[in-house]
Amino acid sequence: MKKVNFLLLFLTAFILTSCDPSQGILFTNKGESNVKVKLIINPQFKNDQLDEMKKGDSIVFNLIPHNPEEKIGHIYFGRGRWNNENISEISKSIKSIEIENDNYKIVYKSQNAISNLLKENYNGIVMKSLNIKIDDDFFN
């Protein structure tokens, strides 16, 4: 009986720790033209992951639609689940987000606009992810 309880406890602990998804922001180009995503980092708020990735004061992704290796930009924030508090902290660390293609440019400048962009693109049922899909309708 003790072996069964120990095995059950071990399996429960393993399942609970192994189900922790990775936190990240994924920018995916689903359109037909090249897309440039530029995140200008707010120097007033420290974020190790963003600070590690930035060059100068920003992080830039050039997303090419028909190249599988270059149609995605990813920022990894470690293990865990997204929640409103995490999203709020990340949005404070970002001063602005610029998304542009050959014809249009959208700039998210305020903390509220950045937070809303992230929250609107946070989806899924069990393994929720933060994936900003940029297609040709994104700019309309």
Image (spheres, grey):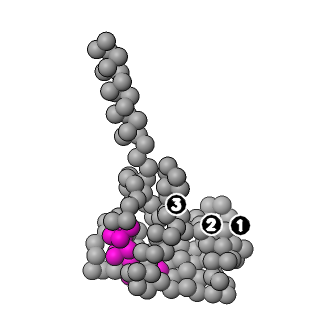
Viewer-nearest of discs 1 and 3: 3
Where is residue 50? Give x, y as percent. 37, 69
* The quarter of the displayed image where residue 56 is located: bottom left
Q: Which stretch is magenta? A: 87-97
Q: Which residue is mark 2?
A: 71
Tag count: 3
Q: Residue 42 versus residue 52: which sits nearer the camera?
A: 42
Q: CB atoms at circles 1 and 3 under 8 Å apart? A: no
Q: Which residue is mark 1?
A: 66
For the residue marked with disc 2, what is the amino acid? Lys
Q: Is residue 82 visible?
A: yes
- CA distance separating discs 1 and 3: 25 Å
**Residue at (40%, 54%) from the top-left corner?**
81
Task: Report helix, strand or loop for mark 3.
Answer: strand
126 in the magenta segment: no
90 in the magenta segment: yes
Task: Report helix, strand or loop for mark 2.
Answer: loop
- CA distance separating discs 3 and 2: 20 Å
Closer to the chain start, of discs 1 and 3, is 1
* The quarter of the displayed image where residue 24 is located: bottom left
**Residue at (31%, 20%) from the top-left corner?**
5
For the residue marked with disc 1, what is the amino acid? His
Q: Main secondary structure of the magenta part?
A: helix
Q: Which residue is mark 3?
A: 123
- CA distance separating discs 1 and 2: 7 Å
Q: Is residue 57 visible?
A: no
Q: Quadrant of the N terminus?
A: top left
Q: CB atoms at circles 1 and 2 under 8 Å apart? A: yes
Where is residue 73? Give x, y as percent. 54, 66
For the residue marked with disc 3, what is the amino acid? Asn
Instruction: Name the side, left or right, on which 133 lies relative to 59.
Output: right
